[in-house]
Image (cartoon, rainbow, N blue to C red):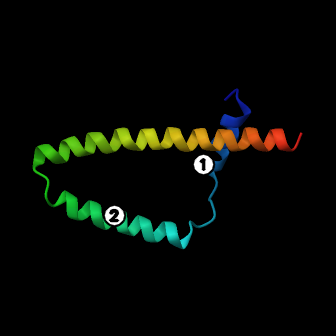
């Protein structure tokens, strides 16, 4: 890892983070329940398509989170110089 921000992001992912907020956990439970109910309606083909979509969506979400974290590090560096 040549980029110091990549190194910091990697270190953040490896550390045990503080527990997520109660609001996040509540929304996560709601999401899980909604997904369970939705999956009950899927045909086998629809389930395969949804799994393909879900993997792509997760990759997009990960890229966005990395982008936000990178911007936060750059902003902090600019502020504290």
User: Which quadrant would the N terminus be assigned to in this image?
Assistant: top right
Question: Is disc 1 placed on a helix, strand or loop?
Answer: helix
The residue at 15%/46% (across/down) is: 46
- The label on residue 32 is 2
Question: Is disc 2 placed on a helix, strand or loop?
Answer: helix
- The label on residue 59 is none
Looking at the image, residue 32 sits to the left or right of residue 64; the answer is left
The residue at 63%/64% (across/down) is: 18
Asked if residue 18 is positioned above or below residue 11 in the image, the reply reads below
Please report whichever mark, 1 or 2, sits nearer to the chain's N-terminal start. Answer: 1
- Can you name the residue that lies furthest to the top here? 2
The residue at 41%/44% (across/down) is: 58
Q: Residue 37: name its quadrant.
A: bottom left
User: Which quadrant would the C terminus be assigned to in this image?
Assistant: top right
The residue at 66%/35% (across/down) is: 6
Looking at the image, residue 14 sits to the left or right of residue 36; the answer is right
Residue that mark 1 sits on: 13
Q: CA distance from mark 1 to mark 2?
A: 23 Å
The x, y position of residue 43, in whole percent, is 10, 50
Looking at the image, residue 44 sits to the left or right of residue 9; the answer is left
Looking at the image, residue 72 sits to the left or right of residue 37; the answer is right
Closest to the observer, 28 or 78 = 78
Q: Residue 76: name its quadrant.
A: top right
- Can you name the residue that lies furthest to the left here? 43
């Amino acid at each position: 890892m040549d980029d110091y921000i990549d190194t910091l992001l990697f270190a953040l992912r490896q550390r045990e983070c503080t527990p997520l907020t109660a609001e996040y956990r509540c929304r996560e439970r709601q999401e899980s329940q909604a997904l369970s109910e939705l999956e009950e309606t899927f045909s086998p083909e629809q389930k395969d398509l949804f799994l393909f979509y879900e993997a792509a969506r997760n990759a997009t979400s990960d890229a966005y989170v990395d982008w936000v974290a990178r911007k936060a590090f750059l902003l902090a560096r600019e502020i504290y110089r």
